[in-house]
Amino acid sequence: MKIIKYGSLLLAMLLLTGCADSVSFEMAEKMMSVGFLHGLWHGMIAPIAFFGSLFASDIAIYAIYNNGGWYDFGYILGIGALIGSSSF
């Protein structure tokens, strides 16, 4: 039963990483800044993005077109939610 549970979780995480976007520096200058909710989401997928960034140079774990403090706050909460839920 644990195998199905963890397998489902892994599959869900892999499917959700398809929501991540890729932006060049030139495009980032023209884009509207992202805030708290994007930071929260990016914090939650940070471990997967980090793993991907080891193998692909165009994957980053942090949005370069963020709006500053609120994005950072969401990012830290997202990482904290991921770490906190893993100790559950």
Image: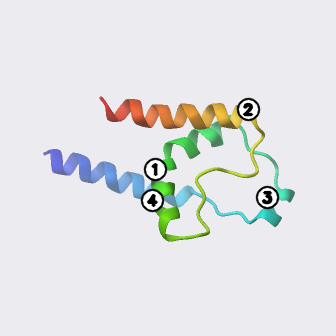
Tally of numbered tags: 4
The residue drawn where x is 50% and y is 48% is 45
Circle 2: is it few (<14), some (14-19), or many (20+) Cα within 10 Å? few
Given the image, on which type of amino acid does mark 3 rest? Ala
Left or right side of 44 for 28: right
Residue hosting label 3: 28
Mark 3 or mark 4: which is in front? 4
**Location of residue 86 in the rendering, given as x and y in whole percent from the top left corner:** 33, 35
Alpha carbon separation for disc pair 2 and 1: 21 Å
Question: First in sequence: mark 2 or mark 3?
Answer: 3
Q: Quadrant of the C terminus?
A: top left
Q: Residue at x 16, y 45 (%)?
A: 2
Q: Crowdedness of circle 3 by 10 Å Cα count: few (<14), some, many (20+)?
A: some
The residue under label 1 is which amino acid type? Pro
Q: Secondary structure at mark 4?
A: helix
Earlier sequence position, callout 2 versus callout 4: 4
Give the SS element for disc 3: helix
Q: Quadrant of the image for the N terminus?
A: top left
Q: Please report contact status of discs 4 and 1: CB closer than 8 Å, yes or no.
A: yes
Asked if residue 19 lies left or right of residue 10, the reply is: right
How far apart in space, not on screen, are marks 2 and 3 (Cα)?
Answer: 18 Å
